């Protein structure tokens, strides 16, 4: 029996939920790091161009495919482009499944750091404590890793269990304002630090001499990850949009907020780093370094009101991660509901358990577990976690994204896409012909460049 489809209760609820999916570890963890590695300024500018020229048109494409089909990624792509396109949807669901399985592990670290920073705030940061050792100690502790990722998985399942309007939307409406509030507090504090001027110059003053070809591709690759594109998450969220909400306006809001938050997070982190002598030499070389090794200590030694802001910062990371993990689980759950007729409660629990089996593998990747910590499929990637991340970021998201541009730009009729985008609510600045040009030519060419680069060994993970 077909079940009544749940919908977003309000446009703002939908925009917040989709923004919550987009804002995640990609903004707080990956973007600052790659901006650092690529020398700031020019890279940031290139990233903004990629977001506008590739990310935004694909965001609109995914949302319109979802809203038109009113089904999960598999069903919606089949409706939009033909039966064979169900495979692309299936690719997306698989990608969501894998990404969720290891994303939860890093999300779990935020819970650990919240607990530790609370302890340090109350009893003082222990003199001489090496935060690098704290980090390696926690990732290497199998029981702890399993407990943290289980806790995070249970939280994710609990939200998705209650469905779109009563679960996902309600959480987004409550948590995103808190997330924005914490970020603003952190920003104000960071701007008061002595390194903020240098940080702003580093981020916003472009120096094209330092830009490399690989940086352009890295910016492009990251625009998929950060906007939750290429794997059907936005198709799924789009399938719960009611007809009278404008896809164009919503896409613009989601993309703008995601970008703004990534920039604010970067300003915060770099202001701290530039305020401390010698710190800029230390942070390079590791993605986890900034978030989980350098920052915890600096909250207590450098950051104004760090005693308060330290724990709040890890609440921020946890909330950002949670609103992303629920969207990843929803991709899988909505597929099970729509394509296999399973009720939401059972679909959520079943999918949650299935994903968690793989989360166990990822969680044990940093402990001395044979195979899980030693697996070496790709060059320079060791262990289950790194292998899965490499596969998703390099292969799955770009190929999925490419297929979606082809479906929306070349397979679907002009009439079909035009009627979804020009729905009477679109803003004045929107021009359908421009969108169509970008989705047919610019976006596929750009994504094809990523895929070719991956074939030649460039790494986006
Ligand atoms: N956009 C998320 C981030 O920036 O961390 C990652 C992500 C979440 C990708 C959900 C895909 C997705 F469906």
Image (spheres, rainbow, N blue to C red):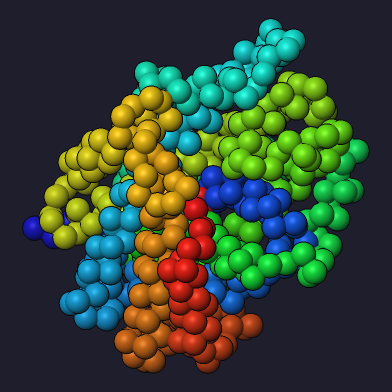
**Residue 249 versus residue 240 in the image, above or below:** below
Query: In the rendered picture of this protein, how many numbered marks are placed on residues?
Result: 0
Outermost left residue: 1
Quarter of the image containing the N terminus? bottom left
| Residue pictured at 68% horizontal, 52% vertical | 37
Outermost top residue: 123
| Residue pictured at 38% horizontal, 55% vertical | 391
Res 237 → quadrant = bottom left
Residue 297 image offset from top left, x and y in percent: 71, 24
Q: Is residue 15 visible?
A: no
274 relative to 16 in the view: left or right: right
Res 382 → quadrant = top left
Q: Which sits in the foreground, 170 or 193?
A: 193
Residue 239 image offset from top left, x and y in percent: 33, 65
Q: Which sits in the foreground, 371 or 33?
A: 371
| Residue pictured at 14% horizontal, 50% vertical | 342
Residue 3 image offset from top left, x and y in percent: 17, 56
**Residue 281 versus residue 380 in the image, above or below:** above
Q: Is residue 42 visible?
A: yes
**Residue 400 versus residue 40 in the image, above or below:** below
Q: Which sits in the foreground, 428 or 411?
A: 411
| Residue pictured at 37% horizontal, 68% vertical | 400
**Residue 376 versus residue 86 in the image, above or below:** above
Residue 450 image offset from top left, x and y in percent: 49, 70
443 relative to 261 in the view: left or right: left
Q: Which sits in the foreground, 145 or 383?
A: 383
């Amino acid at each position: 029996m077909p079940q009544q489809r749940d919908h977003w209760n309000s446009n703002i609820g939908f925009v917040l939920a989709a923004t919550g999916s987009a804002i995640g570890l990609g903004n707080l963890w990956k973007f600052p790091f790659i901006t650092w590695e690529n020398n700031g300024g020019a890279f940031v500018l290139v990233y903004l161009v990629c977001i506008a020229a590739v990310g935004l048109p694909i965001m609109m494409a995914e949302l319109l495919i979802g809203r038109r089909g009113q089904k999960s990624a598999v069903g919606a792509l089949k409706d939009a482009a033909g039966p064979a396109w169900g495979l692309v949807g299936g690719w997306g669901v698989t990608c969501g499944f894998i990404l969720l399985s290891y994303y939860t592990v890093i999300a779990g670290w935020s819970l650990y750091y919240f607990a530790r920073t609370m302890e340090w705030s109350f009893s003082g940061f222990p003199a001489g404590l090496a935060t690098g050792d704290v980090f390696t100690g926690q990732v290497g502790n199998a029981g702890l890793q399993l407990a943290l990722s289980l806790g995070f998985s249970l939280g994710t399942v609990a939200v998705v269990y209650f469905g779109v309007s009563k679960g996902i939307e309600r959480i987004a409406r409550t948590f995103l304002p808190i997330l924005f509030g914490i970020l603003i507090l952190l920003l104000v504090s960071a701007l008061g630090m002595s390194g903020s001027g240098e940080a702003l110059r580093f981020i916003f003053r472009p120096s094209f001499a330092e830009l490399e070809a690989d940086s352009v591709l890295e910016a492009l690759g990251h625009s998929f990850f950060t906007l939750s594109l290429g794997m059907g998450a936005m198709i799924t969220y789009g399938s719960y949009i009611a007809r009278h909400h404008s896809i164009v306006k919503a896409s613009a809001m989601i993309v703008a907020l995601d970008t703004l938050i990534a920039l604010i997070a970067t300003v915060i982190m770099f202001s701290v780093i530039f305020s401390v002598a010698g710190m800029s030499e230390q942070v390079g070389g590791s993605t986890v370094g900034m978030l989980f090794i350098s920052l915890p200590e600096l909250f207590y030694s450098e950051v104004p009101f760090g005693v308060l802001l330290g724990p709040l910062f890890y609440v921020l990371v946890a909330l950002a991660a949670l609103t992303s993990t629920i969207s990843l689980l929803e991709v899988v759950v909505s597929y099970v509901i729509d394509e296999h007729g399973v009720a939401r409660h059972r679909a959520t629990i079943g999918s949650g358990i299935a994903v968690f089996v793989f989360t166990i593998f990822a969680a044990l990747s940093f402990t001395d577990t044979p195979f899980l910590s030693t697996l070496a499929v790709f060059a320079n990637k060791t262990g289950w976690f790194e292998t899965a991340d490499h596969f998703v970021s390099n292969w799955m998201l770009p190929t999925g994204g490419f297929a979606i541009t082809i479906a929306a730009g070349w397979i679907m009729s002009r009439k079909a896409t035009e009627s979804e985008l020009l729905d009477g609510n679109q803003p004045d600045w929107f021009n359908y012909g421009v969108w169509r040009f970008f989705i047919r030519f610019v976006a596929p060419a750009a994504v094809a460049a990523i895929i070719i680069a991956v074939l030649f060994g460039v790494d986006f993970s």
